[in-house]
Amino acid sequence: MSDIVLKAEKLTKHYGGVHALEGADFEIRKGECVAIMGDNGAGKSTFVRQITAVERRTSGKVWFDGNYVDFQDPLEAREAGIETVFQNLALADHLNVPDNLFLGRELIKFKLGPFSILDYKAMREATLEGLKKTGVKIPNISNSIQNMSGGQRQCVAIARTATFKSKLIIMDEPTAALGVQETAQVENIVRTLKEHSEPVILISHNMRQVMDLCDRIVVFRRGRIVANLNKTETDGQDVVAYITGAKTQPQFEVEAAA
């Protein structure tokens, strides 16, 4: 049985005459943490939007959990097991932690005609289990999100991905707006996810973070993948050379010329 969780083949996205993503081949295996790096506009977020069905791909194929998939929307991708933490977090400030974790996926205790009674106890227990799984420490989960620090908010967004039966977690610049201490907390969560063999795709500009956390580094440039590097066989200067275009792996030079 293959341990490949996600595989994309020739994934392409055009916006009219703009080729934002062209022929991207990508795969991630169980327990692997793969970094996606590149300058702004290199195609990183466009790639993620295609595999999570935030946008419809122009062409290409995607396999997830051993099956060919063509998700119609992000909800379908999420129900299949792809959980994404976007830069804007998508949290409801006025709600507490359990309500945020189960937003749109509330547990129903029973229904009375058109009305539903939510199972708050079950959602609270599942929230505590999700926080425990990721190592997230929130003193009072009944507090509303608006009363939490940026680091705590980010941790809640990540814990949400682990509360459900996720098969792949994608994080888009999870520490970009955080301080040193809060960044360390989020990075510890990523390590915890790896210990549980959760595959993680990490989009980041932070070279130190990538080298500390990830097993492979996939570099995007001008809408194309230009390098696929094992962390143990590269360094920061080497990665920067691929990001800037000073260097390209031979196999990708052939593909770009084709």
Image (tube, rainbow, N blue to C red):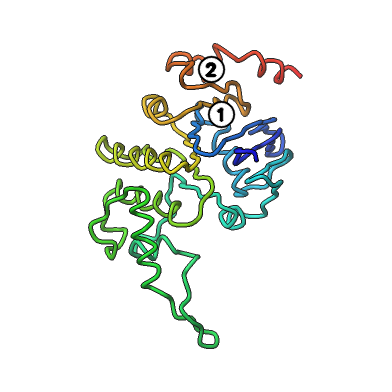
Which residue is label 1 attached to?
A: 42
Could you tell me how far apart the alpha carbons at marks 2 and 1 are, in whole angstroms? 12 Å
Rendered location of residue 3, percent (x, y) = 60, 38
Q: Closer to the observer: label 2 or label 1?
A: 2
Apparent side of residue 99 relative to residue 219 in the rendered image (left or right):
left
Say which amino acid is labelled 1: Ala
Rendered location of residue 4, percent (x, y) = 61, 38
Rendered location of residue 114, percent (x, y) = 54, 85
Q: Earlier in the sequence, mark 2 or mark 1?
A: 1
Tell me the residue at 47%/36% (across/down): 202
Tell me the residue at 51%/87% (across/down): 112
> Badge 2, how many Cα within 10 Å: few under 14, some, many 20+?
many
Rendered location of residue 20, percent (x, y) = 63, 33
Q: Is residue 229 above or below residue 198?
A: above
Say which amino acid is labelled 2: Tyr
Tell me the residue at 74%/39% (across/down): 59
Which residue is label 2 attached to?
A: 242
